[in-house]
Image: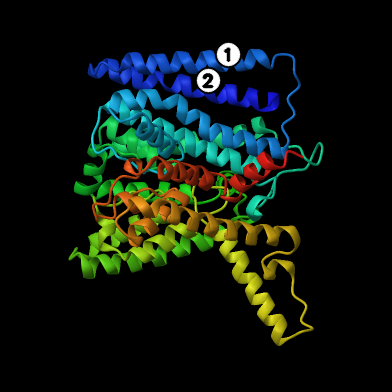
Amino acid sequence: MINAARPLAVALAAIGLLALLPAGVAARTGSGHAPIFLATCAFCIFLAGALRFTTQGHVVRLTRAGGIVLLFALWMVLPLAATPAIAITSGLAPLAAWFEAVSAFTATGLTALHQGQASLYVWLGLLQWSGGFLTVVSAVAVLAPSGLGGLPDRTPRGGAALDAVDIEAVLTETAPAYAGATLLAMVVLLASGESLYVAFTLATAVVSAGAHLPPEAQLALTLDGAPKWLLLPFLIFSATSVRWHRALLTRRIHAAPEQMESLVLIAWWAVLGIVLGAILYRGADVPSLEAVRDGLFSAASLISTSGIGPNDGSYGSLPLGLVILVVLLGGGALSVAGGLKILRLRAILLRTRGDLMRLVYPHLVQSAALEGGVGSGMRGVWAGAASLFVVYAACVLALSPGLPGLEAALAAAAAVVSNTGPVYDAAGFGWPAISSLPAGSVLVAALGMVAGRLEIIGLLVVIHLAIWRT
């Protein structure tokens, strides 16, 4: 517990400092909500100071198992700290406000809000932006070194076998690129003529693969085609590995282990974009150039599991089954994207090919790279894939009672476990908000969103550790 207290204190302090920005926005717009954001800031910093004081003089040694428990605590505690501000500024009930906070922090985008104060959407944008950053850091520093779900561990080994990776080193490695991409997206949008408010909310959404947008930002996407073209590279950025980004920046692209996965992902985006464009052209009576643009944008948004649509209700024109399959597959490993990941699908297909070849040619010798991996790595891939569909089925069963039909339950469960809220909210069928369902369904949906950020199998590890303490 002491080992987890200090990182939790740092995270609480960061959330408290971020609350100052919506407080400033509320004070400038005169909405009267500045005090609640200031109170959130004071409470988070006080709690962070108390946790830091209790760990003074203790040597922190975060193990891999402790790191997974820490991540679960972060995903559950930090939205609680953000809930009062959301409840007061939006008028939502406490449970619905907590669900909104979890949805924003996990960059899922499931929402019951259709309008609100600028300070509220700035707060939600900061939550999803910080949640996207936590997703990247947790994958590189804890989940991949723990071997969860077959994630690639590219970190040098050191210390005891159960030690987690140095979090400070991971922050130093990933923070500049993440913050730089956000700033660049804002600058590009401002240069295209968008307001600072719209540019900020769109930039924080696409870089974190989130979907909490104010009506003004969604209207800008609907009326103007320029932002869609400008945001495409950033959606691809959010769908690909942070290790690949580093290789690009240091011009060591061909030495990057994630090179093949990223190239496969980009090819998949191009093919899917053309297919979706053709569907929009035939079904929605859209001009050819606009159909191609909207198809490419929708493909990038779905693969990155952001889910931001090119138009309001645009996913209603696409086959729901195809949309669900795309988001369940997701993007690249060690990225902010959710879903199964291209890495696991590629490993499964390669391993299947290798097994089939071995049936035809029993004495054939193949390299492990051509078979998708061997040993614990491949077992992790199979375990990650199986856990995804087990949790998906559980979410379908838990959400079905409060929804109008099986189609809505399938879409809601896919939105939850892949962290792609607009698949459900923007489907165009008028389904009820998830936060309005019975309390049990809301709780399961929240746990499903957190599971999506723990590579699904991480939640099962937490449950295992809670039952078997040894």
Instruction: Residue type at mark 2: give it.
Output: Ala
- Quadrant containing the N terminus in the rendered view: top right
Residue toward you, 430 or 140: 430
Residue 282 x/y as whole percent: 22, 70
Relative depth, front residue between 237 and 128: 128
Could one spot residue 331 in this view of the protein? no
Whether residues under marks 1 and 2 lie with C-beta atoms below 8 angstroms apart, the answer is yes
Residue at screen point 23% across, 35% down: 115
Q: Number of labelled discs?
A: 2
- Report x, y in % for residue 270: 41, 63
* Residue 222 in the image: above or below residue 120: below
- Crowd tier of the residue under label 2, counting other residues whose Cα lies within 10 Å: few below 14, some 14–19, many 20 or above: many
Compared across the picture, whether 389 is left or right of 227 comes to right
- The numbered disc on residue 406 is none
Q: Amino acid at mark 1?
A: Gly
Q: Is residue 174 above or below residue 336?
A: above
Which residue matches tag 1?
Answer: 49
Check the image and report above or below for 408 versus 272.
Answer: above
Q: Residue at x 40, y 27 (%)?
A: 83
Q: Can residue 264 be seen at all in this image of the molecule?
A: yes
